[in-house]
Image: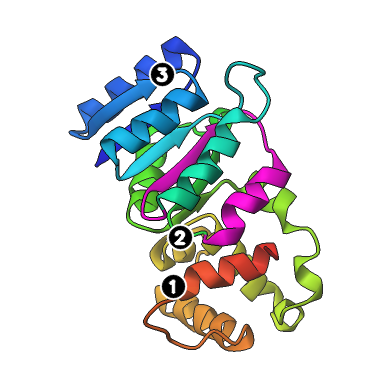
């Protein structure tokens, strides 16, 4: 992967660079603020960006707003938000346009570097990677409309794990069921949410958007 990193904490920024280089990825740029992020993306056109939320000058939401701009201007570039904070308003905007190629992980909850790199690879490939805490806070009124109220408790559980970016095999392992059982649940979810096969829409992503009510 060709990657741009935006992180104002120098030690963490350098650590991410080394982690990704050790796994044979290319880090095109590693920058400390949102303006430098926008410039680096325009110059290098990476496969994916890793973006912190709170960066100079105000340390509020510069990174997330830059991520939204990048997704609007370069929809083929993946964005993985990697932060200590959950910022629901701008996160909803980031995911609401097209969640394919978008992730949101919380720094303190990533306990294995493999989990981080796996999530980054999923996002770069057009998948999603959402921390369960992010899903919980964005979930809102999702159970009340859009066909979600017809799902069984197990189907809600499967859909929640899909929102985290897990594969059918990973969901089966988490729920201690067979992969065939998960495939059946996923098929039921698509049917109940009226998501027929399509050449243009990724049904897993569309189901996640419906789940988050974005």
> Rounded to the nearest whole Å, what is the CA distance between mark 2 and mark 3?
25 Å
**Nearest to the observer: residue 110 or residue 71:** 71
Looking at the rendering, which quadrant does residue 54 occupy? Answer: top right
Q: CA distance from mark 1 to mark 3?
A: 32 Å
Depth check: 119 or 94 in front?
A: 94
Q: Which residue is mark 1?
A: 202
Label 2 Cα neighbours within 10 Å, binned few <14 / some 14-19 / many ≥20: many
Q: Is residue 202 above or below residue 141?
A: below
Farthest residue, direction top? 11
- Of the numbered discs 1 and 2, the one sitting upstream in the chain is 2
- Disc 3: which residue: 13
Are circles 2 and 3 on residues that touch, CB within 8 Å? no
Q: Residue at coordinates 73% horizontally, 49% vertically from top-left?
A: 137
Residue 100 is tagged as 2
Q: Position of residue 150 (x, y in %)?
A: 73, 84
Q: Is residue 148 visible?
A: yes
Q: CB under 8 Å between callouts 1 and 3?
A: no
In the image, which residues are magenta?
Answer: 75-98
Colour scheme of this structure image? Answer: rainbow
Disc 3 packing (10 Å; few <14; some 14–19; many ≥20): some
Q: Secondary structure at mark 2?
A: loop
- Of the image marks 2 and 3, the number of the one nearer the N terminus: 3
């Amino acid at each position: 992967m060709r990657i741009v990193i935006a992180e104002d904490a120098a030690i963490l920024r350098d650590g991410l660079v080394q982690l990704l280089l050790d796994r044979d990825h290319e880090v095109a740029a590693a920058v400390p603020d949102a303006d430098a992020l926008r410039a680096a993306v325009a110059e290098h056109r990476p496969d994916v960006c890793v973006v912190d939320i709170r960066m100079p000058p105000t340390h509020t939401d510069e990174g997330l707003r830059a991520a939204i701009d990048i997704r609007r201007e370069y929809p083929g570039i993946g964005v993985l938000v990697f932060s200590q904070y959950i910022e629901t308003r701008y996160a909803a905007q980031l995911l609401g346009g097209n969640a394919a190629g978008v992730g949101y992980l919380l720094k303190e909850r990533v306990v294995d570097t493999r989990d981080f790199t796996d999530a980054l690879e999923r996002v770069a490939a057009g998948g999603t990677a959402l921390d369960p805490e992010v899903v919980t806070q964005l979930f809102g009124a999702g159970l009340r409309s859009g066909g979600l109220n017809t799902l069984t408790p197990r189907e809600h559980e499967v859909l929640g794990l899909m929102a985290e970016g897990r594969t059918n095999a990973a969901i089966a392992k988490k729920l201690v069921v067979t992969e065939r059982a998960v495939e059946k649940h996923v098929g039921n979810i698509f049917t109940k949410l009226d998501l027929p096969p399509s050449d243009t829409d990724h049904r897993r992503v569309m189901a996640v958007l419906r789940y988050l009510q974005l």
